[in-house]
Image (cartoon, helix red, strand yellow):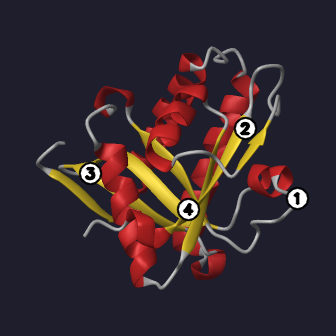
Amino acid sequence: MIHDLIISDLTRTDMKSAYQVFKTSIPDAFKKDEIGFLKEDIQREILHKKNLLNDSLDLPDSGTHFLVAKLGETVVGTISFGACGEETRDCTDNQLQHVGELGSLYILPDHQGQGIGSALINAMVEHLYKQDIEQFCLDSGYKLAQKRWLRKFGEPYKVAKDYWGPGSDHLIWLCNVKNFIKK
């Protein structure tokens, strides 16, 4: 874990740096999953995340809350909580539409594997607990992330086989906030 890491709510001054996390981390995640050739999908995902950032600050009723991990003034990681995403709704026949979703968990490649993602998850879970939110879900189509989530969150609530194509499943977890509160 990095000692001078600060986790805080997203502010307007963090926007450019947070957007850079997406511009760097999303293509890297696609490349590591051997789907880096999906250039249009990468750009669509980056734009979607940029819009979520903007909406979280510009539209108070957007329902999306971002936390950022910073080293100095530079954002090195992000996480959000908001309404269930399209894939989660699609894969569960809207069974989890009433449950909010952790998302936008991206860490700059040079800072991955140092505990920043876990620190962001823990901070967001604490935020949810303080808001009296009892459950959250999260999903992933990235194979590398799925391995991490299986270790951290256990067996998924739903596995959508071949959702992204042959051999590319989409996994969804449903978690109780209290199970992840650090005592």
Q: Position of residue 10 (x, y in %)?
A: 40, 64
Question: Which of disc 1 and disc 4 is earlier in sequence?
Answer: 1
User: Marks 1 and 3, Cα distance to the nearest angstrom?
Assistant: 37 Å
Q: Which residue is mark 1?
A: 93
Instruction: State the quadrant of the C terminus.
Output: bottom left
132 lies left or right of 162: left
Give the SS element for disc 3: strand
Q: Residue at x 46, y 84 (%)?
A: 131
- Of badges 2 and 3, nearer the viewer stands 2
Quick one: label 2, few (<14), some, or many (20+) residues within 10 Å?
many
Pointer 3 or 4: first along the chain: 3
Quarter residue 125 falls in? bottom left
Q: Is residue 153 above or below residue 182?
A: above
Please state which of the two labelled residues, at mark 1 or mark 3, is closer to the viewer. Answer: 1
What amino acid is labelled 4 in the image?
Answer: Cys
- Mark 2 vs mark 4, foreground winner is 4
Residue 91 against residue 131 in the figure, above or below: above
Tag 4 near tag 1, CB within 8 Å: no
Q: Amino acid at mark 2?
A: His
**Label 4 to label 1, Cα distance in Å?**
18 Å
| In front of the other: 161 or 61 | 161
Tell me the residue that label 2 is attached to.
Answer: 170
| Camera-nearest label, 3 or 4 | 4
Q: Is residue 6 left or right of residue 80?
A: left
* Residue labelled with disc 3: 70
Q: Secondary structure at mark 2?
A: strand
